[in-house]
Image (spheres, grey):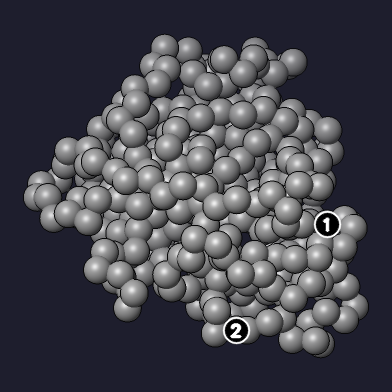
Amino acid sequence: MNWDETEGNVPEEQNTGGQPPPFRFVETPLPDEPPLRTPYTETGVKQEAIDEILENPAGYLWFADEDYFEQEGENIEEPPYVPKPFSPTRGRNAVIILFSLGILLAVVLLQAGLRLSGEAAARMAGADSVTLATERPPEADGGYTATEIATMVLPSVVSLQVAGQPNDMSINNASGSGSGVILSENGYIATNAHVIHEATAIQVMLDNGELYRAEVVGTSPEHDLAVIKIKAAGLTPATFGDSDLVQVGQRVLAIGNAAGVLPGSLTQGIISGVQRDFPLRAVTGQYVELSLLQHDAATNPGNSGGALVNAYGQVIGINVAKLESETMENISFAIPASMAVPVLNELMAKQG
């Protein structure tokens, strides 16, 4: 999915007042060298002028084999993949990257038995709703190490492979991937709406390498959130923390399908800012504004829908976007859990 070339250059009136042009996802082919948009100034994150924005942030897309989704069965074998090389960014000033793209690898990651006894009640025992943990675990006043957090949270983060609608320029279906966060023991999973937009087939890979087909339960394009479901039981749902309590400087970790080729990757950083307002053009074409968490944990294409967790292993955000250029580093964004949880619960309730 990439920028809509039919939109043309950014209208002159969108460059006034220091406001960035909105963006959205469309199904168009990916050029090897993405064209550039008209310069504009981005003030929403209090940075210096961003002179150029790539027409196609999905230049980091990785493609799946065209016969992949013709396989039968609930649990299907891992397909072969043909990666598309990364598009160069050297010499360009800026690009807003949406992470939703990459491939799945069957990687078995940490499965040690460490769990927070104080979090057991906060986890969903198969219930089709999510709650926010409002207290820190008593045994973790100073937080956990990155290794301990990885052991706790990795089983709750999945990788997604998506096949989309075919386009006029290719015999293959458009394809990409992202990440997801397990919401319940019985198979509900959260991700970004842009990750599964117009998907014709979705495959989920668990932390232990198991593969499942998923169905879309519901989407909220105005929040860039979606819920999908797999036919599984005994999954490890994530514990969600209250993002309203988040403060600048707090340690966070991002978990997801980094660069589209490394499921279950974990990076560490801090909260750089809160309530960062971004005007976006959603997959529906509507203009929306999200108030996001800003952090500096490394994120890459493929991290969309993955978890941003605090030092206690609680999911405080769903990773959604980043800014990238030669002059800007480590500017990533996540949908706050306090915003996401009510939306996700509503989407699950509609199916019930």
Residue 250's place in the image compared with 30, above or below, is above
Q: Secondary structure at mark 2?
A: helix
Query: Closer to the camera, 284 or 163?
Result: 163
Residue 305's place in the image compared with 153, above or below, is below
What residue appears at the point 50 percent right and 78 percent down from the top-left corner?
284
Q: Badge 2: few (under 14), some or many (20 or more) residues near its Cα, within 10 Å?
A: few
Q: Amino acid at mark 1?
A: Val
Give coordinates of residue 305: x percent, y percent.
Answer: 50, 49
Q: Badge 1: few (under 14), some or many (20 or more) residues near its Cα, within 10 Å?
A: some
Query: Closer to the camera, 206 or 351?
Result: 206
What residue appears at the point 39 percent right and 16 percent down from the top-left corner?
111
Disc assigned to residue 30: none
Query: Closer to the camera, 57 or 82?
Result: 82
Give coordinates of residue 339: x percent, y percent.
Answer: 64, 56
Q: Which residue is mark 2?
A: 7
Q: Secondary structure at mark 1?
A: loop
